[in-house]
Image (tube, helix red, strand yellow):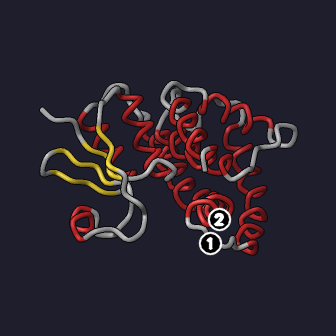
Amino acid sequence: MSKPVLHGVNPSPFVRKVRVALAEKGIEYEQVPVMPMGQTAEYLAMSPLGKIPCYQEGDFTLPDSSCIIAYLERKQPKPALYPEDAREFARALWYEEYADSRLAEIAGGIFFNRVVAPKMLKQPSDQAAIDKALGMLPVALDYLEKSVGDREVLAGSRFSVADIAVGSMFVNLAHGGETVDAKRWPKVAAYLERVHGRPSFKPIIEEEKALFASL
């Protein structure tokens, strides 16, 4: 049986989400680079919104990182990436949504205009967009500092989709030159160190660092 295929490019936080989930579950896969713009008609047939990633198993295709991880959980339940408790399950879904919307807005504004536009597209950066994102970042970090609290993880008692989603966005922030001030947000800083140090996350981060160092 052939390996599943993940369509998308690595610097995408949403592609990274799925790569980390696949690593956590020990699922081998092949990756086909697809940029988040200018897709072919063939790709749009698989992912009608034109977004990355898209997951493929033979003639079965599924777009959207959240849908893909939920599918992987049903197909291979162990190790679980969602808490069993109803409230903690809901908490995990909420932090995934918070990451995929608010944190994506912040990370995207910084990463795109500091890395993608000038280094990859050879286009000028939008400083106003960077400033807007930087203005939103402390509010998000204050919220996450309270959310993490004394927890090791954001939801339940073990690493989950919540940590994958939040952790992935902070990788893009780091690529964009932003680090979390451990004096102001010590709990978030320690939390991200734990998340990014996992065997599922660390090799991907190092791989991406090497890519950007070559640009």
The quarter holding residue 80 reads top left
- x and y, in percent, of residue 183 in the image: 87, 38
> Label 1: how many residues lie within 10 Å, few (<14), some (14-19) or many (20+)?
few
Residue 173 — which label? none
Farthest residue in the front direction? 214
Residue 150 sits in which quadrant?
A: top right
Q: Measuring 63% from the left and 46% from the top, which residue is drawn there?
A: 170
Q: Is residue 9 left or right of residue 56?
A: right
> What's the amino acid at mark 1?
Gln
Please give the name of the residue rendered at 52% of the width and 56% of the height, measured from the top-left corner: 100
Q: Is residue 85 something one can see in this rendering?
A: no
Q: Amino acid at mark 2?
A: Pro
Q: Which mark is residue 123?
A: 1
Which of the two residues, 204 or 61, is positioned nearer the viewer here? 204
Query: What residue do we see at 56% from left, 55% from top?
Result: 98
Q: Is residue 191 left or right of residue 68?
A: right
49 with respect to 160 (left or right): left
| Place of residue 135 in the rendered image (x, y in percent of width and height, measured from the top left) | 78, 65
Q: Secondary structure at mark 1?
A: loop
The label on residue 118 is: 2
Q: Is disc 2 in contact with disc 1, using a CB cutoff of under 8 Å?
A: yes
Q: Is residue 162 left or right of residue 144?
A: left
Other residues around mark 2 within 10 Å, as few (<14) / some (14–19) / many (≥20): some
The answer to whether 215 is drawn above or below residue 28 in the figure is below
**One can see residue 153 in this view:** yes
